[in-house]
Structures are given as structure tokens and as C-alpha cells.
Image: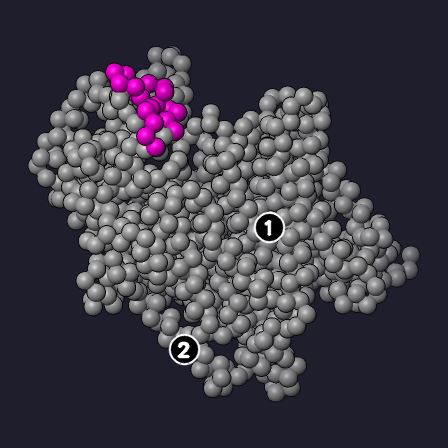
Amino acid sequence: MLPFLSCKLAQYLNGIVAGFTSKTKKIGFIAAKPIPQVLRNCNAFLMGARSVDPKITCQLIVTGDWSLPVKEAEAVNSMVDQGVDVITCHVDSPKVVVETAEKRGIFSCGYHASQAPLAPKGYLTGAEWNWAPVYEQHVKDALSGAPFKNFVRGGFKEGFVKMSPYGKAVSDAAKKKADATKAAMVKGDYVIFKGPLKDNTGKEVIPAGKALIQTDPVLESMNYLVEGVIGKV
Amino acid sequence: MASPRVSAALEALAIPIGALAGAMVLFGLFMLVLGQSPIEVYSLIYQGGFSGAFSWQNTLSRAAPLILTALCVALPAQAGLMIIGSEGALVLGGLVAAVIGHLMTGVSPMGVKVAMALGGMLAGGLWIAAAGALRQYRGINETISSLLLTYIAIALFNHMVEGPLRDPASLNKPSTHPIGDANMLGNFPGLDVHWGLGFGIIFCVAMYVLVKHTTWGFGLRIVGGNARAARLAGLPVSQLVLTACFLGGAASGLAGMVEVAAVHGNANASLMAGYGYAGILVAFIARQNPIAIIPVAVLLGGISASGGMLQRRLDLPDATVLVLQGMAFLLVLASETLYGRIKLFKSREIPA
Amino acid sequence: MTDLGWWGVPLGVLGGALRVSTPFLFVSLGECITEKSGRINLGLEGILVMGAMTGYAVSFVTGNPWFGVLAAGIAGFFLGLLHGLICNLPKVNDIAVGIGLMLFGTGFAFFMGKPYVQPKAPNLPSISFGAWSDMPQVQAALQVSPLFLIGIALALFLAWGFRNTRWGLVVRMVGDSSDAARAMGYNVNVVRTLATAAGGFLAGIGGSFLSLYYPGSWSEGLSSGQGLMAVALVIFARWNPIHCFYAALLFGGAGSLGPALQSVGITSGYYLFNAAPYVLTLAIMIATCSPRRTLAGAPGELSIVR
């Protein structure tokens, strides 16, 4: 079973909350490897933030592997030095990133599971995977004799992704907008990646009038960073 | 009864086996302390590694690269060098092989395979020869430099695979371009094990003959015994050392080629499966003897093949196998002290 | 907050040097003691990882990070003792035993450490030296760990002790000529075993810094060869504890070069930048070693320089 859950939706919501919270208008994303799955989340994070304030930029740091705690901590420190004040990540475990952000007194959004206890002051919210419905569906399929699905895709609508409860620092305006967006996502027709969309080299990647729904396979091969992300694939 | 030769062979066989048995007892006690039944653990290791066609296939597929990476330790060891950089030679060999396999067109698959093997061996060989050269010409400890070179090789590998050499079609697992189905190494006739095992065995036998039965090998062993005496005797010490390092690195590079051409079909991060590090252990348990490497690699391949079974059945962490391996390693090294000290193996004349 | 721009790189490297150097410092001081006695312990990488795991686990269980530091040292002491005892056996090679200990220590730590990857253990406090600056970046860079200060004190103490105390002279004599030491009535094996155990103790503490201060949590990817690089660093530092300190700072700074460059927009080639410490170690060894003469300050009995 290879469940590629749509965390980009959740990272978009992370981005909305980050957009409301950031004062320096610089947010950061720490990635293990520059692969489509990760780039998509980074792009969604910034696009969520830009839906609040289009001036926001997102710094991307790639550590090079899934578990490099010292590099992850160094990445947080160097981003904070550059003025970044909200950070999220896509590595094996966000523990080190969230903890280091808390030590430096900035905000963080999590991933995989709730990290709120690690950063009581700075944790905003986070996308969590909710495995129960995935397994439920597998069991249901097995009982009904349907073939085993090797590739499961889904988001909020299917109940595969949920958000951790909002932290103290999240403003009411942020909650309101994030909740409204989430409600639209639950209906299943919310589109993040739609044209016109430019990448950070100025090239148009999605032409005006075209919308990629969240299960569109084209998104599985995303190899660009959207405008406003500081970094290179 | 026991001629000196026979008793020395018996000693060389009995002491490592005794040390391994000691490690098994120690590990069994450790499991007992943790509330696991040692008998159950060992029977699972046996089931996972050595019973049934499927386990054997898994074991032998793991043994193939281990045989080759162990040679990367054992050959320089003949000259007294302790090289632990097999992993670096393996990934570079795999990378070069994958590039050759992708770029060579208009050549018969056999030609491509030969070129891939040669390319992988050259890359690995030069990498380890560099560690040998640093030692011969700059006096740098080869154990440390070969491990540093491994870290550098892995960084280069990642840089190339995720950068300039990346196949844009490889999405969430960055890889080089595929070498193509026609260029893949097939299986042994009648067996579900790829040809890499054959390469390993041939390489081991050839190196055994080279080291034990040629003048070159004799010279190499003199260097390993006493480099100063070898130099006084007029042996080309540096040349011998560098060649041994090159051959060792070539074996590891070939392991990378085998992993690319028989398992993955391209170069990607899965090449770094730790075969290089496990090969160090194989070489030391085999006491750097190229022939003994073969059974030891099969044994360790089987133990690591059973790791998943231990995890699933007994809920033990995947590092369980590492603990057993670490204990075996330390006891085998400690047992070095027993050579020539056990009465039983002293050669003696016994009247018939 | 002031916009630093490119100044972020030197500041990041300086901050990184202060943050990341402590494990290098402790491991290299430990190895310095061991090598002065004429043995090399390449297994300090394994001891470092074991110390990191033990320190985190004990801090989690007792709620006091300092108990964790002590426990990490004790775990390192016993692994060092194991190395020392095995090497006392005739015909056993210390470098090979070190490789074995490296594999055993990391494997054992991964095995025992599984339950402690998730929970949060109390971390060591930090001491601030940046109050004079009104730039938060500088203040943050000058947050140092008490272990760092202890490490500096230890380096000074060892440098003094090797010259001026009885045990210092005994360790050095055993390392320079075992025959002379035997003639003076010292038991060479006992001295070397204790020196290796003491080295293990320090390396274990170096490991606890990783899990209890920076980055401050236990996971299997925690060490990326710091223990091994520290062994190389001792050769570079010519077995001088004070030089070990400078070298540790240099290596710490090199490790933070990659992320610092990425944060100002140099984003390609991060794998290569991240390999900077390894390249630096190798380059330094190439520049400072020589096959023809024995290194100044090298213990005469040491197998790597003989």
C-alpha cells in the first residue's frame, strides 16, 4: 500500500495561518529532498500564505536526507537569522524543527502528527495524517472482495487528512479564513493550483483558465517552485 | 596424525566458529534478559534466512554484494591496510555503471553489460586506490581517510542523482535514467538468484589464487607482514599496496554495478543499503581470506534477511540484527588472541 | 529584526561553531587522552551515539538532564573499558576493535533507543552571552551550553595536567615508550585501559550534548560521523588539547556552512556544501601529515603514526 495523501491541502491551510501570523512576511520551509511530493507542499504552503498577503515570500532549505537532525536545526537557525518567523517542514520527523523554532521564539506549523506539546508557545497548527479511514477502506474492500488498492489518494473529503487544533498565537481572523477554506475543501471541489500560475523563474506553469483539481495526476510530477519561493529545484 | 598444515587449517576454522558460537550465546542471554526466548529468536533467524526457496533466494541476493564489498576490505588487508570505505566505492561504481548503461546505444546488450562492469570497477577501484595513495605518499591513516572518502562519495552520488543526472521522469524517488530492460543482468539458470552471486564467487576465487599462489601475492603478504622489510628486500611496496587497493575497490564498484544492473535498473538512494559497512564485518569474520568470505557473506546475508521476520513476529526493533553483528564482530576480533595458544591445534608428531 | 543579508553567512558559521562544536570537543579530548597512552580508539563514533541515547533516555526517565549527562558518560566509560580490555589481549589490533565498537555501539544504541524517539526529555539549559548586543541574531548565536564551557575548562586542565601532574606524565610515558614505562614499574595495559575508559567517558558526554542540547532530541540520524571526524581532528591538533578546541570550532563552523548559504539564496549544490566537514578533514590531513617524518607531538607507540 502506498498512500499518497493530499497533504498539500493541509499545507495550504498551514500557509493561511502562517500568512496571518507572520510579521516579517518571510516564512520558511525545510525539505528533505526536492521531490514533487515535497515541492507541492512547499508551494501550497506559500500559496496559502499569499492568499492572505501576496507580498509574503517563502525560504526553502533542502537538508538532503529524511533524518538529519543537526542540519535541520541549523536550517531553522539560519532562517531565523534571516528574519523568517513562521516555519514548517517536510522531513521524517518535524520534532527537531518545531523544537528549535520554539527555542528561537518563532512560530511553526507541524506535519504527520500534532507537535503542540513540543512548542506550547509557537505551535500554530499542522497537517496530520489520519490513517484510520485509509485502513477502514482497505478492510471494506477486502471484505467485499474488491481488489486491493495500491495507490490511495485522498484529502479532507475522504477523512485522510486533518488539522491539529489551533495554537494560542492564531488570530480569530486566521481561524475564520482557514475554517472557511477547510469547509470548501471538505466539499471536495477546492482547487489550489490554477492558472495563471508562474514559477519562481518567471515561467508560466499553469496557463490562465486552467485548474488542476487536487487529484490531478499532473500534480504528482510537479517540478517547479511557485513565484515567491526562494530556492532552486 | 595432524600435520602442521592441517592443524593450522583446523585452527583457522575452529577459532572463528567458536567466536561466532560465543556471540550467539551472548546474544541469546541478552534476549533472555529482555524477556525473549533465544530459541524462538534463533529459529526465526533460521526460518527467515535459511529455510525454503524464498528465504534462500533472499539470503543469496544479499550475500552477492556482501561478498564483493568484503573483498574491498580483505584485499588491502593483505598489505596491512584497514580500509573501511567499501560503501563509497559501491555507490560510485553503481553511479558510473548506470550512466554507461543509459548512454551506450547501438551496442549489443552483452557489450553494454561488460562496459558497465568495467566502468563500475574502474570508478570503485580508483576511489579506494586514492585512500591507498594518501597512505603511501602522505602517511594518512587509511581507515579514517577511507571512511571520509565514503561520506564524500555519498555526497557526490546524491548531488549527481538529484541534480545533473536525474531522470526527470523519476518523481518521488530521484533516480538516474533507466539502463533499459535489455541491459539488465539475468538470473542463474534454474535459480531465482541474479548473476551478481556468480561474479562474487569468481572474484573471490581469482583473488584467492592471486594472493596465495602467485609471486605478486607473496610480495603483497610480505608487505602486510612488515613493510620495512619488504622495502629492504627491494619490493615495489607502493605499487603492491595501490594495486591491492584498486582491486578491492573494483570489487566494491562491481557490487554497485550488480545492484544497478540486477536489482534497481538505475542508480538511486536504495544503493546505500549498508552493504559496504556489513562487508567490513564479513571480511573480519572471514579473517580476510577471500574464500572464507563466501560462506560468511551467506551467513550474514541470511541473518540480515531475517531482520524483517524478527520485527514482525517478536516486535523487536530492526536494529536487533545490528546488535548480534556487533557482538560477533567484537568476539571474533578478541579471538585473534587465541591463535597458536590452544594446545589441541599445536602441530605435533604423534606415533601412529 | 535587522535584515542581515549576506552577513548571515559568517554569523551563521560563527553561531554554528559555538553550537555544533561541543561534541567534537569532547570526543577529541577523550581521544587525545587515549592516544596519548599509545592506543587509538576508532569506536568513539559508536560511543558518541550510545551516549546520546543513554543521556536522552535517563533525562526522560529522571526528569533531570544532568543525570542524563552523567549516565551518558558512564555508558561511554564502560564501552571504552571494553575496548581497552579487548586490546589488552595479545595480537589484537586496536584499530579493528575500534571498527567493531563503532558498529556495536551504534547498533546497541538504535536497539535500546527505539522507545525514546517519540517522547520529549528535558534539555540542558543555555547560558546567554549576547546581552550586550541589541541584535536578536547575535544574541541567539551567543547562547552557549554549559557543556561547551566545561569543555573549554577541560581542555585547559588537560593541557596543564599532561605536563604538570604525575598521571599526565605516566600516560605520556606509556604512550611514548612502553619499555621505559615497564622499566619504571608501571603496568602499561592498566594505564592504557584506564585512558581508553576515560576517553569513552568524555565521548559519551559529547553524545549527550547532541541529544540534550543541540539539536536536543534523540533519533537514529543524530550523529553524522562527528565521532569519527573528531578522531581525525586529534591528529590535526597534534595531540594538544588546546588545539583540539580550535579544531572543534573550525569543524562546527564548517558543518553550518551549507544551511547558512542556502538561507541567503545559494541553493544549488547543498550536498556538496554539506560534505564540507569531510573534505576539510581530508584536506587538513593531506596538508599536515607526511610519510617521511613522525609528526611532532605524536605518541611513539601509536599504531597510526608508526
**Residue at disc 2, secondary structure:** helix
The N terminus of chain B, quarter of image: bottom right
Asked whether, in this view, residue B134 is left or right of residue A194, the answer is: right
Q: Give the labeled residue for mark 1.
A: B85
Label 1 packing within 10 angstroms: few (<14), some (14-19), many (20+): many
Residue A136 visible? The answer is no
Looking at the image, residue A214 lies above or below residue C207: above
Res C156 label: 2
Label 2 packing within 10 angstroms: few (<14), some (14-19), many (20+): some
For the point 91% across and 60% down, the residue is B351
In the rendered structure, which segment of residues is drawn in magenta? A201-223
For the point 68% across and 29% down, the residue is B113
Residue A205 included in the magenta stretch of the image: yes
Determine which quarter of the picture holds residue B257. top right
For the point 76% across and 45% down, the residue is B207
Looking at the image, residue C90 lies above or below residue A42: below
| Position in image of residue C254 (x %, y %) | 43, 57
